Amino acid sequence: MNKEFFTKNWYLLTPAVIVLIPVLMMVFCMVNYGYGVTEAMKAVRYAGSTSTRYAQGFTERKFKLVRIGMDGRTIYNTIKNPMERNLPEDTEWRYSLPSSGTQYYHERVLVLEKDRNGVPRVKQKISRFHTPD
């Protein structure tokens, strides 16, 4: 195939571009947010309806540093204050919330549990694309 063929028949590439753009968006979600294929597909599917508010100073890189068993003080030193905490139990730290009027967002939550010494430690790390269903 030569340049002249593509110049005259550029429209034949349209189906490839239609497929390529969502695939590139999925790859972005997988790399940037650490999603699997299913989560990335959801994020791309609802891309126009997504809006997420994050805690001040929050970054995906910092959130990825959090590990199961990490204590609350280390978490605070890494990502600082969450947007919401369920006091007085203080077992859930939310680092993201949906923007007003939005149902789809990038959910980032740490579920903590106090050890036998009363030190809160990460029990579960939630990093997913939130959908209402």
Image (cartoon, grey):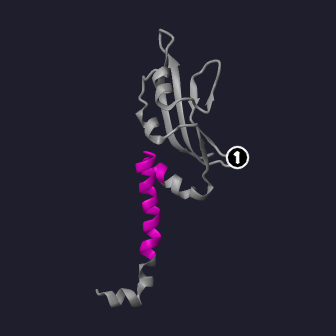
The image shows residue 60 at horizontal and vertical percentages of 47, 41
Q: Residue at x 61, y 33 (%)?
A: 83
Outermost residue to the left: 1
Horizontally, residue 43 falls left or right of residue 30, namely right
Establish if 7 lies above or below 121.
Answer: below
Q: Depth check: give the residue in front, 84 or 42.
A: 84
**Magenta-drawn stretch contains 35:** yes
Outermost residue to the right: 101
Q: Depth check: give the residue in front, 26 or 54.
A: 54
State whether the magenta stretch is mostly helix, strand or loop: helix
**Magenta-drawn stretch contains 133:** no
Circle 1 SS class: loop
Residue type, label 1: Ser
Horizontally, residue 83 falls left or right of residue 76, namely right
Q: Residue at x 32, y 87 (%)?
A: 3
Establish if 32 lies above or below 47.
Answer: above
